[in-house]
Amino acid sequence: MKKILCATILGLNVREVEVEVSFIRSLPSFGIYGMAQTSVKESAERVKASLSHIKYKFPPQKLVVNLSPSDIKKEGTHFDLPIALLIALYKEEIEFSNYVAFGELGLDGSLKDTSLIFPIILSLSQNLKDKTVIIPKESFEKISKIPNLNIVCFENLKEVIESFKEDSIKPIKTKANFEYKSIEIADKKYYYLEEFSEDFLDIKGQERAKRASLISSAGFHNILFEGSPGCGKSMCAKRIRYILPPMSLEEILEKANLDALSLKEVEFTPLREFRSPHHTASRSSIFGGANRAIGEVALANNSVLFFDEITYFQKSVLESLREPLQDHKILVSRTKDKIEYQTKFLFISAMNPCPCGNLLSKTKECKCNEVEIKRYKNKLSSPLLDRIELYVQMEEIDLKDKPSLSSKQMQEMILKAFTKQKQREQKELNGKLSDSEILKFCFLDDDLENILNNAIIRFELSQRAINNIKKVSRTIADLDDSETIKKEHLLEALSFRMK
């Protein structure tokens, strides 16, 4: 019996799989076992055609391929290469324990890349440092971005077999090299772009909305824009993406991983994702559903999730947002398994002040009655609004409005605030701090505690709202280059609470 390592993917989780091959004296047949799904079972025909192309003759015996452990589903065409390799070298005295193989086979024996190879190897990268990873040449450009791997790539099955027989496999050590601007904090690099496809300089006026966008971006604080149609809510939301804090190597690779799993072109850039599902999107498309489909909240991890016209989303979708917004993770339970996704995203939302949109207008008449307005706003429950740290009521456009801060200027301010957060040895940005971390990093002196206590009584603030105010205050202090939270920082944070 021969065996070599491969792997399968379950949602965002990866499990190592041991591919075992054995020939048994029996009527000739070819069987793949171990909860192999259709894409894996089809490997039998591709492997036969590929081996026949290189003149390999199957012995007149029963061929058994087992994928262990046998109690989890195996998916993907990348099992072709390890199966074919073990069959072709079955009689050779070769030890495969230090090798991991991935690749789809063409009928002519060529090796092809698949959408699952990159995310699988990325997820397993910490466990593969002492092993040699065999991949198709097509996969090299992506896989080489993952640091500290020993990889060897081939164009076809014949090359792989001959390299093993001649003992001429010479792996290459990968080293990530990103040619982007970066800042270094505590011997760790964080990368960012200075390209602003959409610039805050395009927005005239709306200074309060810009200030809120700056605070939201610097600390990853959830934000809600309310205003009349055309006042610039979506413009602000779309520009936030370009001024967000820089990304670590791990975050860039994770974003690339999510790109691969969502069948997008993989890009190794420090530009965070901007996920903007339509309000008609189903609950399963937002949170993940059948067939291990990954939802928007998981794909937006470390990036932006934007709900435009938030009041028109299904009630079940909005209420289900509570867990990912609070715990920064979501557990999707299915019939036979449970999959946990990280959801540390920046949640941006926008809404009109009423169904017709003219309630705040100085020139247009609102056609809605009080019952309609109340029903419209009641679509957002108090527990959901409690998880949104910044609320901005935007003004109508005025002819006297002028541009002010550019995205470049805002990015420079955010970089300084980001540096302060990391120099405090924070693992997370201010908006994602845990309760214990809030006590450590968001300290208020006695005078500020008195101000906050008065606000608690006046506005009936929950404990969650109190923590959110402290986190926003900390971010405002960082933007002000202040080591401590001061009175003006706390008051500004309170001013952004929805009354």
Image (tube, helix red, strand yellow):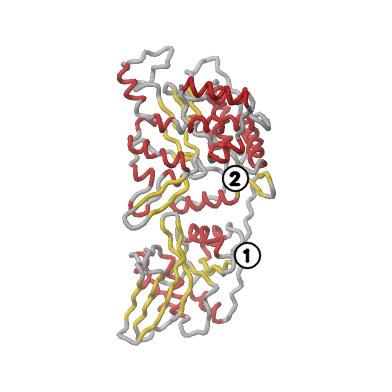
Q: Is residue 259 above or below residue 35?
A: above
Q: Label 1 is placed on what type of residue?
A: Lys
* Quarter placement of the N terminus: bottom left
The crowding category of the residue bearing disc 2, from other C-alpha atoms within 10 Å (few below 14, some 14 to 19, many at least 20), is few
Q: Is residue 373 above or below residue 388?
A: above
Q: Is residue 199 visible?
A: no
> Residue shown at 49%/41% (left/top)?
345
Whole-percent x and y of residue 96?
52, 76
Q: Label 2 is placed on what type of residue?
A: Lys
Whole-percent x and y of residue 33?
35, 72
Residue tagged 2: 427
Q: Is residue 14 above or below residue 88?
A: above
Whole-percent x and y of residue 70?
37, 69
Residue nearest the observer in this picture, 150 or 104: 150
Residue nearest the observer in this picture, 119 or 382: 382
Residue tagged 1: 173
Q: Separation of disc 1 and disc 2 at Cα?
A: 29 Å
Q: Quadrant of residue 115?
A: bottom left
